[in-house]
Image (spheres, rainbow, N blue to C red):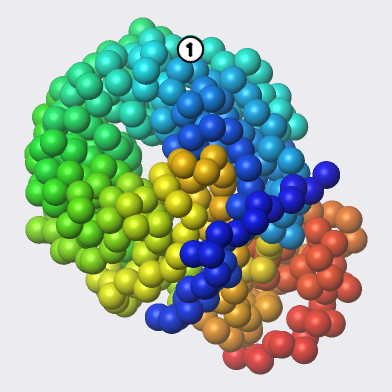
Amino acid sequence: MRIATLAAAALLTSAAQGGGFDFAAPRDVAVGSSPSAVVTADFNDDTHPDVAVANRSSGSVSIMLGVGDGTFAAPVEYAAGDWPIELIAHDLDHDGDLDIAVANLREDTVSILLNRGDGTFDPPVAIPVQGGPHSLAAGDIDGDEDDDLLVANRDQGTITVLLNDGAGAFGEPTHFRTGDWPSGIAIADLDDDQDLDVVVAATYSDAIVVHLNDGTGDFTESVRYPAGKWPYYVVLEDLNGDGHPDAAVATVSTFRYISVLHNRGDGTFDPMTTYSTGINSFVLVAGDFDGDSDPDLAVCNAGSSTISLLANRGDGFFDDAVNMSATLGGRGIAAADFDHDDDLDLVTANFQPGSASIIENLHAGVDGDIDHDGRVTLIDHAVFVDCMEGPGVLPNPTPPWSLPDCLAAFDFDQDIDVDLADFAPFQLVFEGD
């Protein structure tokens, strides 16, 4: 059964057009009470992006399974914990399915919800951490090929490390100090030494705190970089194409800006550049929203009920924001191609109305253009041949291309395969070299 959308309020009537962006007005879906975060992932392995929403007041997670055309099955609610404030999706038990980890702010725990393989989940298993777990990240910290957890404990000013045993169970927690009121956390290899480092948005330190991994999983050494007033959320993404993750930071102050800090390649950062957005920019997400192959930024502004879209100029610096109306109280934002039209759509978690908003990207891409250079050339032809498996057979392309890439670019008849029926329309758009 597909979900019905809630009636749109008057402020939602305008789509975002300009700066290379073209988004439809939001479509609201009722979820649990006081949604505080959202994540996208393919939970049931059907190639369609799904949505998970953390509902703070109802202590639950809502799962919305994608149909593949931008609509979703009715949300299913799962118990999570007391005040789930943030969630992530990772394969925690090494079975090929994406599980969910939730930070429960008021009971000082992280809950693990293991995926049964079909997009339904086992009851939560709670793991004690320290005071006020507010954000979390997952990655292989100890080099054993399992995703471990790092939890930012806001009230305690610490990070908790939970090492995975490979089956989705976690050992005794260890902790290390970080900045004041750590609200956001992200991990990536910042210094190109083949291990994962940690960046924390420390709200009351007005800084991001960088903890470089010493190679043994020790993060106790740290460096602080000013990131604006009250940084709340951090995303690590290579914004300037130099192969090194940069930091984009959302702030919850009324000064209406975000900050971007470029990585020098060794895990140190240039001074911040700020960009005007809206009031209380709780979260942001990076992605190519205008189809030019550079990661742009979409910022959820809870205080002004807007989303700010910032186009990357190609060098990691950004044009002035294009602002579009959004549902009241946006606290979470994520991106995925929900309708398989080869562009990234948005979803927000909206605190006050208790909804998730689906925001369709209307950017006109080029069918058959898998490398997003605006033309269908021999490169695209070669990948088409690699993706073509025959009727009813899912593509199994050579990396870096993926199954969703193949279907988005080459499945012209939308029957979830790439076969001879798709070759004729591909030939019509093929330009040669």
Relative to 248, residue 181 above or below: above
Image side of residue 213 versus residue 38, left or right: left
Image side of residue 383 versus residue 201, left or right: right
Q: Quadrant of the N terminus?
A: top right
Q: Nearer the viewer, residue 83 or 395?
A: 83
Q: Residues within 10 Å of mark 1 (few under 14, many from 20)?
A: some
SS type, badge 1: strand
Query: Across the whole image, how many numbered discs are drawn on residues?
Result: 1
Q: Quadrant of the C terminus?
A: bottom right
Q: Can you name the residue that lies furthest to the top here?
A: 172
Relative to 379, residue 375 above or below: below
Residue 107 location in percent, x, y? Answer: 39, 13
Give the residue type at disc 1. Answer: Ala
Q: Can you name the residue that lies furthest to the front here?
A: 10
Q: Is residue 150 visible?
A: yes
User: Residue drawn at (40%, 57%), measured in percent from left and top?
Assistant: 305
Q: Is residue 89 visible?
A: no
User: Residue drawn at (75%, 32%), measured in percent from left and top?
Assistant: 118
Query: Splitting the image into 4 quarters, where does residue 137 fall?
Result: top left
* Residue named by callout 1: 126
Query: Splitting the image into 4 quarters, where does residue 344 fall?
Result: bottom right
Relative to 20, residue 261 above or below: above
Query: Splitting the image into 4 quarters, where does residue 383 fall?
Result: bottom right
Q: Nearer the viewer, residue 432 or 272?
A: 272
User: Residue drawn at (14%, 48%), measured in percent from left and top?
Assistant: 229
Residue 429 location in percent, x, y? Answer: 71, 87
Image side of residue 157 versus residue 15, left or right: left
Residue 370 location in percent, x, y? Answer: 61, 72
Residue 376 location in percent, x, y? Answer: 63, 84
Relative to 19, residue 249 above or below: above
